[in-house]
Amino acid sequence: MSSPRHAFTLVELLVVIAIIGVLVGLAAPAVQTMRESSRRAACQARLTPIGMAIQSYHDRWLHFPVGTVAESGPVESVAAGNHHNWLGRLLDLLDQSVIAAHIDRSVSVYDEANAAVLELSYSGVQCPSATRNQSNASSYVGLHHPTEKSIDEKDHGVFVLNLPINRDDITDGLSNTAFVSEKLTPYDDLGWLSGTRATLRNVGGGIVASGDPFASAPPSTVGSIGSHHPAGVHMLFGSGEIRFVANQTDPRVLQQMVDRRDGQLPQQFQSLETLRRQSIQ
């Protein structure tokens, strides 16, 4: 008398495979969410030393680094002109003295003497979520003005053309003034050392969540902030605080954050709390 066989039938095997497929399908979004949460935390961690370096720069020179340098404004997004920017001046304070030593400030950032640095992939200025950016692009941008306009000396942000801004110029208070945020990188980005829209932006277009808004933009266009994070963008304030600001934030609130001397009562906290309540409902 033969013993009974212990094995799966074809139907049982198909059921098990189906169950595994369903479980994998349910787990995948959770895994992706965990990965993005980790990347977002890493992005914030990269903004922290930038904020500290900005303050240390002011302590050393009694002003913040200028946004960009040119013989005259407005600045256009073309590879011509001096265009040494605020990020390049922070390198020593970011513990990157070797990179800083290879920058020749007597010539343009686009000169052959600075080519190696301009083409360098520097992870300290790259958001981990921006995986499709060109290797020498910066994810982080200084904020030059509340609304869309070309970069000039009369801008109302902190990082402007040729003009060094100090703490006394920020009459709205450091904790109420946004210094740095993130950007979506266009195909013609000029690199992390270039003091053009590559490292300077405004908030005139709100928070850009996707797409390439600069595919056909003229060189005088600067553009707004944005990120590859779902739902929002990081903003570094003059106090060193880093806030994750929702994509749906009222553009008027964003403009108030960037304007260093508008003298208005801070509304961003109330507005962000309103958005939070709306998202819960």
Image (spheres, rainbow, N blue to C red):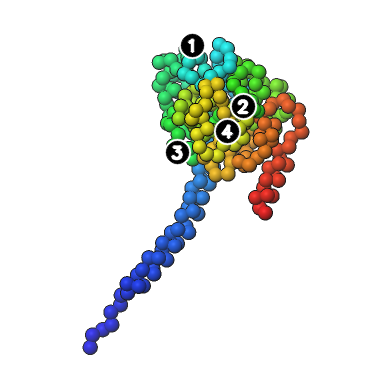
Where does label 4 land, which residue?
225
Task: Give the secondary structure at mark 4.
Answer: strand
Question: What kind of residue is marked 3?
Answer: Thr
Residue marked by disc 1: 106
Q: Is residue 268 above or below residue 31?
A: above
At mark 3, the secondary structure is loop
Front position among marks 4 and 1: 4
Name the residue: 76% across, 33% down.
265
- Where 5 sits versus 193, above or below? below
Q: CA distance from mark 4 to mark 1?
A: 31 Å
Residue placed farthest to the left in the image? 1
Mark nearest the camera among 3 and 1 is 3
Label 2 crowd bin: few (<14), some (14–19), many (20+), radius 10 Å: some
The three-letter code of the residue at mark 2 reads Glu
x then y, percent, for residue 77: 51, 21
What is the C-alpha distance between the residues marked 2 and 3? 27 Å
Q: Is residue 170 above or below residue 226?
A: above
User: Residue 110, how many percent across, how many down?
Assistant: 45, 17
Q: Disc 2 vs disc 3: which is toward the camera?
A: 2
Q: Is residue 93 above or below residue 111?
A: below
Location of the C terminus (image quadrant): bottom right
The mark nearer the N terminus, 3 or 4, is 3
Q: Which mark is residue 148?
A: 2
From the image, tell me which residue sits under label 3: 131
- Say whether residue 138 is visible: no
